[in-house]
Image (cartoon, grey):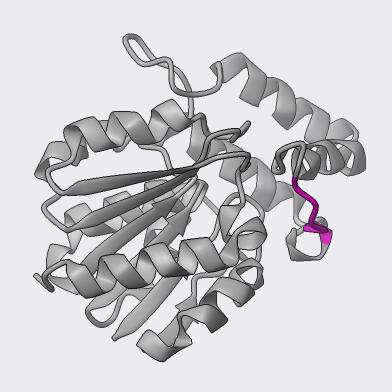
């Protein structure tokens, strides 16, 4: 079994290290990396390059949008889909409130160019719930402002909502109830529209449950992969 991890905005694949180790008995593990991103289409293309064999896809945050695109486009290559802190659209739209207002993302782009250190520090702090403690700074691409801006443009434009009813791959949604980046309603929206989705909400948990509650996430994924038919 192949397991492919797709990270979130600005993050290195290494952030999945603990979860990947916990799942290593299931098969071969690989990570999509975001270095060298030149346009918003590169996120799709980079993930597609990594999906060269039938795999379990684990997408987090921005990576969940990419994972949904991959599962829709290449269902024969995706046996199971796991979305952690996931969303089918990052920003609000008409009839869709489970996201950020686009103006906030545009403001973040300006702040990132003017005060990159402060902006990144604030973002990393927002990944954790009040009760959680983890140092995530080493996993972030601090020195790639241009690529970070492209990532925010991707989050402004990516929209996988219309794909959800057409995705038949078994799907597990793991979401922290105190996620300040992607609200839990984003996963509830997916669960209500996808054909084969299971939603697991974790209490007192923010946007990185695979870091702060690694064992619980690993157990959910092991159950999911073991219980769901390999289609």
Q: Is residue 221 above or below residue 25?
A: above
Residue 156: where, in percent of width, then height?
50, 30
Q: Residue at x 24, y 65 (%)?
A: 80
- Residue range in magenta is 132-137
Residue 182: where, in percent of width, then height?
53, 34
- Left or right position of 73 against 31: left
Residue lying furthest top in this view? Answer: 94
- Could you say which quadrant of the image residue 38 lies in? bottom right
Asked whether the viewer can see residue 164, the reply is yes
- The quarter of the image holding the N terminus is bottom left
Q: Is residue 109 above or below residue 172?
A: above
Q: Is residue 160 above or below residue 231?
A: above
State the count of labels. Answer: 0
Query: 104 or 220, which is in the foreground?
Result: 220
Q: Residue at x 19, y 40 (%)?
A: 163
Q: Residue at x 35, y 72 (%)?
A: 222
**222 in the magenta segment:** no
- Left or right position of 1 against 117: left
Query: 196 or 74, which is in the foreground?
Result: 196
């Amino acid at each position: 079994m192949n397991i492919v991890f797709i990270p979130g905005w600005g993050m290195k694949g290494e952030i999945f290290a603990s979860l990947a180790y916990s799942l290593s008995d299931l098969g071969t593990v690989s990570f999509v990396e975001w270095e060298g991103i030149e346009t918003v289409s590169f996120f799709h293309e980079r993930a597609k390059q990594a999906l060269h064999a039938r795999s379990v896809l684990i997408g987090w945050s921005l990576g969940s949008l990419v994972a949904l695109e991959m599962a829709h486009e290449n269902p024969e290559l995706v046996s199971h889909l796991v979305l952690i802190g996931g969303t089918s659209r990052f920003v609000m739209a008409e009839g869709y409130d489970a996201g950020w207002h686009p103006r906030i993302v545009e403001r973040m782009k300006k702040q990132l160019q003017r005060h990159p250190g402060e902006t990144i520090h604030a973002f990393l702090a927002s990944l954790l719930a009040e009760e959680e403690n983890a140092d995530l700074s080493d996993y972030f691409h601090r020195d790639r402002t241009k690529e970070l801006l492209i990532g925010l443009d991707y989050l402004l434009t990516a929209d996988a909502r219309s794909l959800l009813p057409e995705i038949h791959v078994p799907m597990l949604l793991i979401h922290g109830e105190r996620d300040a980046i992607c609200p839990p309603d984003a996963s509830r929206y997916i669960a209500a529209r996808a054909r084969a989705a299971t939603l697991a909400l974790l209490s007192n948990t923010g946007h990185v449950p695979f870091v702060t509650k690694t064992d619980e996430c690993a157990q959910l994924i092991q159950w999911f992969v073991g219980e769901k038919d390999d289609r």
